[in-house]
Image (cartoon, rainbow, N blue to C red):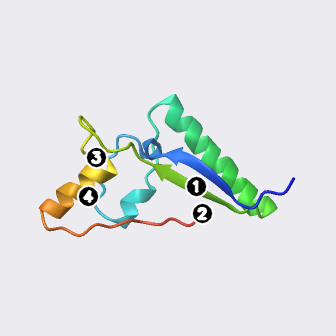
Amino acid sequence: MVIGRLVYLSTDEVYGDSPQIKDDSDIHQLSPTNPYAQSKLIGENLIAEYRQKLALDAIIIRSNNVYGPMQFPDKVIPRFICRTLKGLPWYIVLVEL
């Protein structure tokens, strides 16, 4: 079987309960606080190993919750809305593994 590209769906919960991201350097602070987030981080590490050792073509997506009522304000859509209302720019950080 040949795999063209593996897309691994992780979670933003791998960042844990870190404070608001202030700049690009904060994005690298991974601190999962529950078994689900820890298992996703372990999966990311396995993917990184396979990419390095076997040249597996893979990407990791750290998705967020979908937007809706009662969503936590630290999620991506509420964060972008708040930044827009404050006249602040958005930023997205791409991390190469």
* Vertical arrangement, residue 97 with respect to residue 72, above or below: below
Which residue has dot 1 on it? 60
Dot 3 lies on which element? Answer: loop
Q: Nearer the viewer, mark 4 or mark 3?
A: 4
Which residue has dot 2 on it? 97
Which residue has dot 3 on it? 74
Question: Would you say the residues marked 2 and 1 are in contact, meaning their CB atoms lie under 8 Å apart?
Answer: yes
65 or 55: nearer the viewer: 65
- The x and y percentages for residue 6 are 69, 55
At x 29% / y 48%, what residue is drawn?
A: 19
Dot 4 lies on which element? Answer: helix
47 or 68: nearer the viewer: 68
Dot 2 lies on which element? Answer: loop
Disc 2 or 1, which lies upstream in sequence?
1
Disc 3 or 2, which lies upstream in sequence?
3
Q: Nearer the viewer, mark 2 or mark 1?
A: 1
Report the amino acid beneath label 3.
Asp
Report the amino acid beneath label 1.
Ile
How far apart are the alpha carbons under marks 4 and 3?
10 Å
Q: Specify whether 27 is left or right of 79.
A: right
